């Protein structure tokens, strides 16, 4: 398997595009070659040839035995190392072209999440994967790097320390005290049991049990002024399922109502509606005029109302009456400004 260390400028930050050796891997490969040839090298002779200390050689051999599962043993009678069982080849991370491209896509997506706990962790993971690969490659991902771009608008900055605390609290079941400010409202202190963090339409949300409201609530991490651990632990209910909670939602917010949504789109907008699945419950019906009608079952109207308004005159609400009235009120408010 071959690779180019310049595969992605962002995947290998701060390193030039030309090939670079990886001393630990290259060193162990040389140790393997000498042991495989039956030369019975010892730590002293290996250290001299590879220009490192005997301590480093012992560490490399331990790694080869424990992590690569190579049957390397020391033979006191020959004063050197050998393989106690046949070894066909030196193990290495096997990764094909498609998997490398997937890593590039993941790294590109990561760029949208600068400032979150995932940036540092994923960057470290990419570095470790990259450094475990062999030194040469049969393809150039730099060509793909120029062919792929991922962008988003309206990026929200999230405090890295708060986000890190939220992530750890979810994972370890730690109760939090937060100061939370809703839009156009004064800050409030809340005690919450954080159940799950989700990224929905490129925005971050925290689903947590709110002790003040005594119910599950959706919080926006960017609206948290501070967060600290209370010292109390909690256990997330086995019955909690974010998929189930959002089954009737069109975005991050769900409700307790039930609405049968029907929206008709013009002939111009119909191809754009048909090319996506907007919701698991959606049903499409072709209209005689070339348009399309979409039907959905939702528990909340706020997110679907914003989506409809974004289509302007290309969309017409048929049902329910509450949604139709809400759209009409919004349209009047826009015209009267």
Image (cartoon, rainbow, N blue to C red):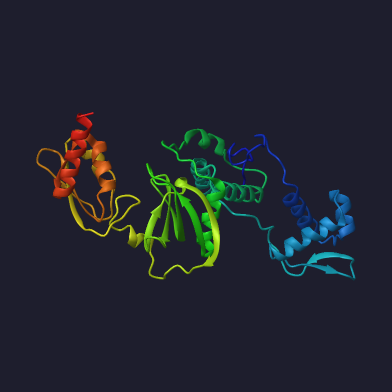
Relative height, residue 26 to residue 245 (above, below): above
Quadrant position of the C terminus in the picture: top left
- Residue 95 x, y percent position in the rendering: 57, 52
Left or right: where does residue 303 sit relative to residue 104? left
Tell me which corner region of the image, top left, top right, bottom left or bottom right, holds residue 297.
Answer: bottom left
Residue 132 makes an appearance in the image: yes
Residue found at the very far left of the displayed protein: 288
Image spot of residue 150 (x, y percent):
45, 38
From the viewer's side, name the closer residue of 145 and 237: 237
Can residue 36 be seen here? The reply is no
**x and y, in percent, of residue 110 in the image:** 51, 44
Which residue shows up at 27% across the image and 47% down it?
302
Question: Residue shown at 41%/60% (left/top)?
Answer: 210
Eyeballing the image, is 17 above or below 206?
Answer: above
**Residue 7 coordinates in the image, percent (x, y):** 59, 39
In the image, 128 versus 161, the foreground residue is: 161
Q: Is residue 136 left or right of residue 84?
A: left
Relative placement, left or right, of 157 versus 85 is left
Count of numbered tags: 0
Residue in the image at 31% along x and 55% along y: 254
């Amino acid at each position: 398997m071959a690779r180019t260390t310049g595969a992605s400028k962002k995947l290998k930050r701060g390193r030039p595009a030309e090939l670079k050796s990886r001393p630990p891997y290259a060193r162990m490969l040389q140790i393997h070659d000498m042991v495989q040839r039956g030369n019975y090298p010892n730590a002293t002779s290996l250290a001299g040839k590879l220009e490192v200390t005997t301590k480093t050689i012992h560490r490399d051999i331990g790694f080869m035995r424990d992590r690569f599962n190579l049957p390397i043993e020391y033979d006191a009678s020959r004063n050197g190392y050998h393989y106690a069982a046949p070894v066909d080849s030196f193990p290495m991370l096997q990764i094909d072209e498609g998997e490398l491209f997937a890593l590039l896509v993941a790294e590109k997506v990561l760029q949208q999440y600068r400032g979150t706990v995932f940036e540092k962790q994923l960057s470290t993971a990419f570095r470790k994967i990259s450094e475990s690969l062999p030194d040469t490659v049969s393809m150039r991902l730099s060509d793909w790097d120029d062919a792929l771009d991922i962008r988003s608008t309206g990026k929200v900055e999230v405090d890295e320390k708060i986000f890190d605390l939220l992530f750890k609290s979810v994972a370890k079941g730690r109760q939090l005290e937060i100061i939370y400010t809703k839009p156009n409202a004064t800050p409030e202190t809340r005690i919450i049991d954080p159940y799950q963090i989700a990224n929905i339409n490129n925005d971050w949300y925290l689903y947590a049990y709110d002790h003040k409201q005594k119910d599950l609530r959706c919080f926006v991490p960017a609206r948290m002024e501070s967060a600290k651990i209370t010292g109390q632990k909690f256990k997330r209910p086995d019955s909690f399922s974010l998929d189930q909670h959002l089954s009737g939602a069109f975005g991050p917010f769900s409700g307790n109502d039930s609405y049968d949504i029907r929206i008709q789109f013009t002939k111009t907008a119909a191809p754009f509606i048909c090319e996506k699945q907007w919701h698991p419950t959606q049903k499409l019906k072709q209209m005689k005029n070339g348009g399309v009608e979409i039907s959905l079952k939702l528990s909340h109207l706020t997110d679907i109302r914003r989506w409809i308004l974004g289509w302007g005159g290309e969309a017409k609400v048929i049902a329910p009456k509450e949604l139709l009235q809400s759209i009409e009120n919004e349209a009047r408010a826009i015209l009267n400004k």
